[in-house]
Image (cartoon, rainbow, N blue to C red):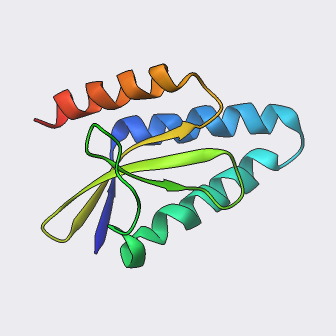
Amino acid sequence: MKIRLLDNAKLDLVDGFAFYQAQGREVGRYFLDCLYSDIDALALYAGIHPKTPEGFHWALSKRFPYAIYYLMDEGWVFVHAVLDCRQDPKRIEERLRQERIRRW
């Protein structure tokens, strides 16, 4: 499968990087390395993850409390969001609803 990281997901990664970089030296870089590795793994494992009510598959990061939300279509994995799982679940649901609207 081919992976496409959409603009909003890229912005999520930038936000996560900034947060972790403020925590200590090179933690932001480690965050990005881990999340990109988790995203790359979707090339092999896309589709095995549970789905949200909005229809997105979601995969948990191995090292950080983040989830990767994606859709699949004809050999492609479209990563729509990379969100911190510690935030209000209603905020995550609203974000995914907005992503679904943008998609169609």
Horizontal side of residue 59 vs 2, given as left or right = right
Q: Nearer the viewer, residue 58 or 13?
A: 58
Q: Nearer the viewer, residue 83 or 56?
A: 56
Image quadrant in which you'd find residue 44:
bottom left
Q: Residue furthest bottom?
A: 44
Residue 60, image x and y in percent? 56, 55
Residue 32, image x and y in percent? 64, 53
Horizontal side of residue 19 vs 102, given as left or right = right
Residue located 19% across and 30% down the image? 102
Task: Judge whether 72 appears above or below 53 on screen.
Answer: below
Residue located 64% across and 37% down the image? 16
Residue located 60% across and 31% down the image? 15
Image quadrant in which you'd find residue 20:
top right
Residue 103, image x and y in percent? 17, 37
Horizontal side of residue 69 vs 16, given as left or right = left
Horizontal side of residue 13 vs 63, given as left or right = left
Image quadrant in which you'd find residue 94:
top left
Task: Judge whether 57 appears above or below 47 on screen.
Answer: above
Total count of labels: 0
| Quadrant in which the N terminus is drawn | bottom left
Residue located 37% across and 69% down the image? 48
